[in-house]
């Protein structure tokens, strides 16, 4: 519907704009969509895994898409705030899942002694897996 190339709209009648010509696409948004699609194709857990909400703090949220039987998981964290943030969560039973490698986005992930710490830039996100 155009979001993947930066098409904006508003209330009717502006909600029915024509799809823009390729020369006017927001290529950064388009590249990000392509990256998300590639991650979803590569990691089955993003298609079929269970959703486990880890928690939220202020304008940020963190959740896990996981396949317990195969010990596969992707950690997703999003910060909607205009300031960078550091998230702290007490988690248990997360150790079998390797989520220390940033797959997409930016920030850091640290899991030690059932304590999960995530740093995210302003308006930032990350997907992490093993």
Image: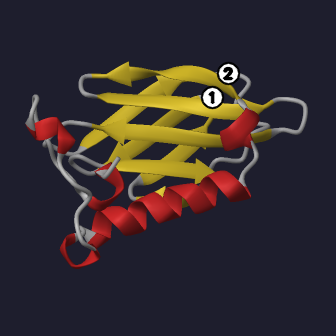
Q: Residue most toward the bottom?
A: 23
Q: CA distance from mark 1 to mark 2?
A: 5 Å
Q: Residue at x 22, y 64 (%)?
A: 20
User: Quick check: 94 left or right of 59?
Assistant: right
Residue underneath mark 1: 114
Q: Which quadrant would residue 58 be assigned to in this image? A: top left
User: Quick check: 82 left or right of 45?
Assistant: left
**Quadrant including the C terminus:** bottom right
Residue 92, which numbered label?
A: 2
Q: Residue most toward the right?
A: 69
User: Quick check: 122 left or right of 52?
Assistant: left
User: Quick check: 55 left or right of 129?
Assistant: left
Residue 50, which numbered label?
A: none
Callouts 1 and 2 close, C-beta under 8 Å: yes
Q: Residue at x 63, y 24 (%)?
A: 51
Q: Which quadrant would residue 95 be assigned to in this image? A: top right
């Amino acid at each position: 519907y155009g979001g993947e190339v930066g098409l904006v709209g508003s209330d009717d009648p502006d909600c029915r704009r024509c799809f823009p010509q390729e020369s006017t696409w927001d290529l950064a948004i388009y590249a990000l969509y392509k990256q998300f699609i590639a991650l979803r194709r590569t990691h089955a857990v993003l298609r079929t895994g269970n959703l486990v909400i880890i928690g939220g703090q202020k304008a940020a949220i963190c959740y896990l898409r996981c396949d317990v039987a195969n010990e596969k998981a992707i950690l997703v964290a999003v910060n909607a705030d205009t300031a960078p943030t550091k998230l702290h969560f007490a988690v248990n039973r997360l150790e079998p899942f390797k989520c220390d490698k940033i797959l997409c986005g930016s920030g850091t992930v640290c899991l030690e002694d059932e304590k999960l710490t995530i740093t995210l830039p302003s308006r930032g996100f990350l997907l992490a897996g093993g």
